[in-house]
Image (cartoon, rainbow, N blue to C red):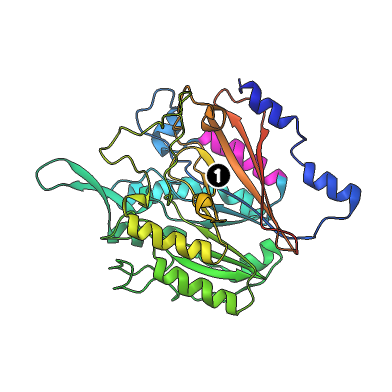
């Protein structure tokens, strides 16, 4: 069962409260675009409770299929999936292709019924375990996996006629060659369709690969700054950046106020915060353009303004909760949000305001409720 505080949040209004309010008053700024974002639907092998189907395909089929149904009811124009749609971690191309095919089959109905699916590469897509000097294994991105990503996801990045037909908006400034240059940002391999961007009206969408070959756990800040600056010159008003790994790791606090640290690895960071200079440069770019960064990797929902104490306004929203085993932190005041499968609906308005409504359900397959509502930006 969901904790009482979550049920209280749900009582604020039903899942379509904004829609109802607009219909009643007619006073709100018009919606110019609506999308949903979430990541991490892959399953773990040999996990207790796996069905035979999930063990074969390594997909959290029950959670992800339920979430897809609920997303479809919202009729978003796009679903941006923030990586780890497959388990991957294999050098066998047939295994990788089969897992991609199963995931693509799951989202195909959504595509056919009016929601464009835009993919973001995650570490499970681009990395494999390799030998470490001195023994042991470490996960590192490989050229073959980057190529497998393009082979299995490239038709979505970007199918301009399909985007136009599905979303009802015309993409612009799409250039398949607009990707981080080799030699900058630690990039050593072709990043075409791994990091990419385009405009949809006054909205700019940028996707980054946070695990490029040779520089895992990073962000192409130089490319992103140039990309967002060019979008601003074209008249973009809202900037959304999507990546898999977070810039700022979420560490919840216990009842005593002490932070819960991850102990799986010696390095407690679970994103590219381990590269502090890269992280800080990246966030400087995010702040300077008033962008919002959506990511996954940590299997929790958490929204924050990481530099708020220093006057920063930008948001990082982690939504790595599409079915992968949840990173549950028991005994913390925020446990109700650390133990749900969640997805974020993002409503972009003509006046520049962005409304985010996060919905979710618990591991007992309970009722979907509104977990949190955020407003980003202000009215003109």
User: What count of labels does the image hold?
Assistant: 1
* 71 within the magenta span: yes
Quarter containing the N terminus = top right
Q: Residue at x 49, y 46 (%)?
A: 103
Dividing the picture into quadrants, the one containing residue 46 is top left
Q: Which secondary structure type mostly characterizes the magenta part of the structure?
A: helix
Image point (31%, 54%), residue name: 275
Depicted 70 relative to depicted 224: above or below: above
Q: Residue furthest front?
A: 310
Residue 105 image offset from top left, x and y in percent: 53, 48
Q: In the figure, is residue 320 to the left or right of 367? A: left
Q: What residue is rendered at 41% in x and 46% in y?
A: 99
- Give the magenta-colored segment's residue range: 61-73
Mark 1: secondary structure: strand
Q: How many residues crowd around disc 1 within 10 Å: few (fewer than 14), some, or many (20 or more)? A: some
Q: Provide residue 339's location: percent of width, then percent of height.
A: 52, 29
Towards the viewer: 367 or 94:
367
Tell me: residue 29, above or below residue 14.
Answer: below
Outermost residue toward the bottom? Answer: 233
Q: Considering the image in quadrants, where does the C terminus appear?
A: bottom right
In the image, 188 versus 267, the foreground residue is 267
Above or below 329: residue 149: below
**Relative depth, front residue between 309 and 122:** 309
User: In the rendered image, is residue 230 in sight?
Assistant: yes
In the rendered image, the vertical position of residue 270 relative to residue 185, given as above or below: above
Q: Residue at x 55, y 38 (%)?
A: 64
Residue hosting label 1: 303
Tell which residue pokes out farthest to the left in this image. Answer: 134
Location of residue 203 in the rendering, given as x and y in whole percent from the top left corner: 63, 66
Tell me residue 163's x, y (percent): 62, 65
């Amino acid at each position: 069962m969901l904790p009482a505080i979550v049920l209280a949040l749900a009582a604020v209004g039903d899942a379509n409260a904004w829609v109802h309010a607009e219909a009643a008053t007619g006073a709100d700024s018009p919606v110019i675009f609506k999308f949903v974002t979430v990541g991490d639907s892959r399953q773990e092998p040999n996990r207790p409770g796996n069905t035979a189907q999930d063990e074969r395909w390594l997909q959290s089929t029950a959670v992800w299929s339920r979430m897809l149904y609920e997303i479809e009811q919202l009729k978003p124009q796009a679903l941006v999936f923030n990586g780890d749609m497959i388990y991957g971690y294999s050098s066998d191309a047939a295994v990788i292709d089969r897992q991609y095919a199963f995931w693509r089959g799951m989202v195909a109905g959504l595509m056919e019924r009016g929601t464009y699916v835009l993919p973001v590469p995650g570490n499970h897509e681009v990395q494999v375990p390799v030998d470490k000097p001195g023994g042991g294994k470490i996960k590192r991105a490989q050229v073959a996996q980057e190529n497998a990503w393009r082979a299995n996801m490239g038709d979505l990045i970007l199918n301009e006629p399909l985007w136009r037909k599905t979303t009802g908006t015309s993409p612009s400034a799409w250039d398949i060659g607009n990707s981080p240059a080799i030699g900058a940002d630690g990039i050593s391999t072709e990043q075409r369709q791994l990091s990419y961007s385009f405009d949809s009206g006054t909205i700019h969408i940028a996707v980054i690969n946070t695990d490029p070959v040779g520089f895992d756990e990073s962000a192409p800040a130089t490319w992103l700054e140039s990309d967002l600056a060019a979008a601003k010159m074209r008249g973009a008003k809202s900037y959304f950046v999507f990546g898999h790994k977070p810039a700022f790791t979420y560490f919840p606090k216990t009842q005593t106020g002490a932070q819960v640290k991850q102990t799986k690895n010696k390095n407690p960071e679970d994103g590219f915060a381990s590269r502090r200079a890269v992280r800080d440069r990246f966030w400087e770019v995010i702040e300077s353009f008033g962008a919002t960064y959506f990511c996954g990797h940590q299997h929790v929902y958490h929204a924050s303004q990481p530099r708020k104490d220093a006057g920063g306004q930008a948001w990082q929203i982690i939504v790595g909760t599409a079915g992968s085993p949840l990173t549950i932190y028991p005994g913390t005041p925020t446990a109700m949000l650390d133990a749900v499968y969640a997805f974020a609906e993002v409503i972009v308005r003509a006046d520049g305001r962005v409304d985010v409504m996060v919905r979710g359900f618990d591991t007992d397959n309970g009722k979907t409720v509104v977990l949190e509502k955020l407003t980003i930006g202000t009215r003109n």
